[in-house]
Image (cartoon, rainbow, N blue to C red):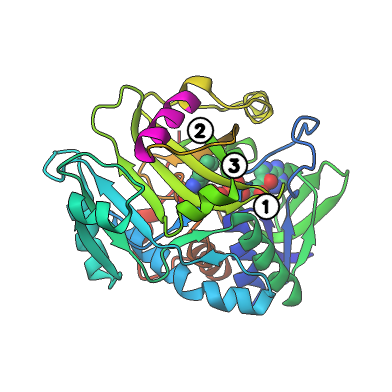
Amino acid sequence: MFDIAVIGNGMIGSAATRYLSAMNQKVLAIGPGEPADWQAHQGVFASHYDQGRITRIIDPDLAWAQVAARSIDVYAEIEQASGITFHQRAGGLRVSPDVTAPVDNVNQAEQVGKELGAIYSRLSQAELARQFPFLHFSPGTVGLWERGGAGYINPRSLVQAQLTVAAQQGATIVRETVTGISQRKEFVELSTDAGAHYQARKVLVAAGGYTNHLVSRKLDLRPKAVTVLLGELSEAEVKRLQGLTTLIWRLADHPLLASIYAAPPIRYPDGKMYIKIGGTVKAPHFMHAPEEFRAWFHSAGDSDEANALRDVLLTLLPGLKVESYQTKPCVYTLTAHEHPYIDRLDDQLFVAAGGCGSSAKSSNELGHIAALLVEKGAWNYDIPAKVFEARFK
Ligand SMILES: Cc1cc2nc3c(=O)[nH]c(=O)nc-3n(C[C@H](O)[C@H](O)[C@H](O)COP(=O)(O)OP(=O)(O)OC[C@H]3O[C@@H](n4cnc5c(N)ncnc54)[C@H](O)[C@@H]3O)c2cc1C
């Protein structure tokens, strides 16, 4: 009998497991690791199977900025305790073609950044060109250049680090997939694909895009198919781009994409260096059934989205020499209020899901909030519960 079982060894679940195991709780964390062969894999995937996720404080939304800042503050502590490094202080740019446009939020993001003490400079187009000569932006562009802890994290390594420390603190980590949740009077029984059964007094469901496949009362979660483009770069091209930061860029009048984000060249498990670009499409494709997820993760993503991303990349970095391109499918799990759901579903079941495409950097603090809620059984945090309240279909 465990005190608490966490379903999902992903970004938020692994953080919650680390915090819960430090609270003197007997914790079980259940969830599969990354499949070695994506095409052969018939089970669940995750939203963190990559080498780079942008981290930054500056954000137009105060709660997002707060959980990011609090997470960034403890990266070094997690790296030290686990012996696993995952944080690169590469800096970050948030760029707007026109800060006076009604849809624009760069000024709002700057206010929030200031409030939270982010280290940044506001750059005009001429200053951007001086600082980042390889980037091309049109006249009138404004950028917020954040330093300090801004940059990127390796999400696979962060999850590994969280689970390493959780295991050191006594958590039991099981690499199985939960197939059923049965609530009894005194405990919850979890069945897995290995035919095993586990019992816990409380359960935190942190299964990302798959959360609604496990809970009986369906949450208003909107798992969205997204495509990532990776451009392989030679070592010479990587050297030319030295000093490139992460980037979030609102696009003016693109037919398909509202904005893009990009990460500087990062080494991938095949030993090669890739520059990464992804974006927010104006007409999203949502998925719900398990077979839709499987088919999406078995695909190479959406070719129109990938082509649009490639064109933006080549406009942004004129003359970029790309050796080869790869596309990858991934999933953002959106929520009704654009914050994750961290809430109590009943006396035994809790949820922490709905990363909204923005939770990697903040996953540590989101897991912390979830751990506090599960352990106490009631909200116990300085950001109001309403901000993370679960909404149902
Ligand atoms: C392409 C892309 C780019 C992104 N870029 C950024 C970025 O730059 N910065 C940023 O902050 N965020 C970014 N994100 C968002 C971030 O990666 C997600 O918000 C984050 O991974 C969500 O964490 P999670 O724990 O909710 O989900 P996940 O990390 O997906 O973890 C969920 C876990 O649940 C497990 N699971 C599912 N079903 C079951 C089951 N039945 N039993 C047991 N386990 C189960 C899965 O195996 C998985 O490990 C990006 C996401 C994508 C897809």
Q: Position of residue 130 (x, y in %)?
A: 26, 56
Q: Is mark 2 within 8 Å of ligand 1?
A: yes
Q: CA distance from mark 3 to mark 1?
A: 9 Å
Which badge, 3 or 1, is on the more N-terminal residue?
1
Q: Position of residue 342 (x, y in %)?
A: 48, 55
Q: CA distance from mark 1 to mark 2?
A: 24 Å
- The residue shown at (14%, 38%) is 102
Q: Is mark 3 within 8 Å of ligand 1?
A: yes
Q: Which residue is mark 2?
A: 226
Q: Residues within 10 Å of mark 2 (few under 14, many from 20)?
A: many
What amino acid type is highlighted by mark number 3?
Answer: Thr
Q: Which quadrant does the C terminus fall into?
A: top left
Which badge, 3 or 2, is on the more N-terminal residue?
3
Tell me the quarter of the picture where residue 195 sits: top right
Q: Which residue is mark 3?
A: 211
Between circles 3 and 2, the one closer to the viewer is 2
- The residue shown at (32%, 51%) is 133
Between circles 1 and 2, the one closer to the viewer is 2
- Regarding residue 106, the answer to whether it shows in the image is yes
Q: Which quadrant does the N terminus fall into?
A: bottom right
Q: Position of residue 107 (x, y in %)?
A: 17, 54
Q: Residues within 10 Å of mark 3 (few under 14, many from 20)?
A: many
Magenta stretch encompasses residue 336: no
For the magenta stretch, what is the residue range? 306-317
